[in-house]
Amino acid sequence: MQIWLAAHPLIAYVIIFVLLTYVYNRVFRVNQKLSLLKEVMLYVLMALGSGILLIFQHDKLPIIQCLLVAVGLMLLVRVRYFLEARQKRRAAAEAAKRQ
């Protein structure tokens, strides 16, 4: 996979940018909205950072694989929260039935 990504740098760049954007939006985004200029500046800086990470990826560091692990762990946490919330709703519904 590393060799193929080194042979296709544009695809690797897009993958890095998409994964980096997902990680930012799920972990670091604040609840309040940013102004349009700040939002554009943020994505421009993320695009530049993706370029730097592409250089690291090209130098045989597993940047994409690490970002995939991070996204996988975030999805695992979301599934866990979903299952816990569903279990709490069931327990509340059973408690309501008993009364």
Image (spheres, grey):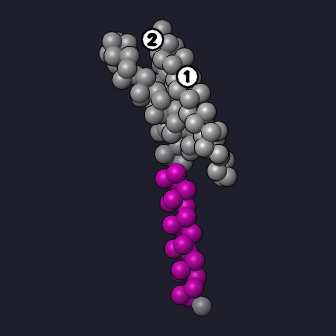
Query: Residue under circle 1?
Result: 48
Kindly state the secondary structure of the residue where label 1 is placed: helix
Residue, x 61% and y 33% (percent of image)? Answer: 41
27 vs 83, nearest the viewer? 27
- Say which label, 1 or 2, has the lower sequence index: 1
51 vs 88, nearest the viewer? 51
Q: Do the residues labelled 1 and 2 touch (CB within 8 Å)?
A: no
Residues shaded magenta: 78-98
Say few, some or many: other residues with alpha carbon within 10 Å of mark 1 (under 14 / 14 to 19 / 20 or more): few
Compared to residue 50, the image places residue 84 above or below, namely below
User: What is the magenta segment's predominant secondary structure?
Assistant: helix
Q: Is 30 displayed left or right of 97 in the figure?
A: right
User: Identity of the amino acid at label 1?
Assistant: Leu
Q: Is 28 displayed left or right of 83 in the figure?
A: right
Q: Quadrant of residue 98?
A: bottom right
Q: Which of marks 1 and 2 is in front?
A: 1
Residue, x 57% and y 85% (percent of image)? Answer: 96
Kindly state the secondary structure of the residue where label 2 is placed: helix
Camera sees residue 53 = no
52 part of magenta stretch? no
Residue, x 43% and y 23% (percent of image)? Answer: 13
91 part of magenta stretch? yes
Name the mark on residue 58.
2
Residue 69: x %, y % from top left: 49, 32
Camera sees residue 63 = yes
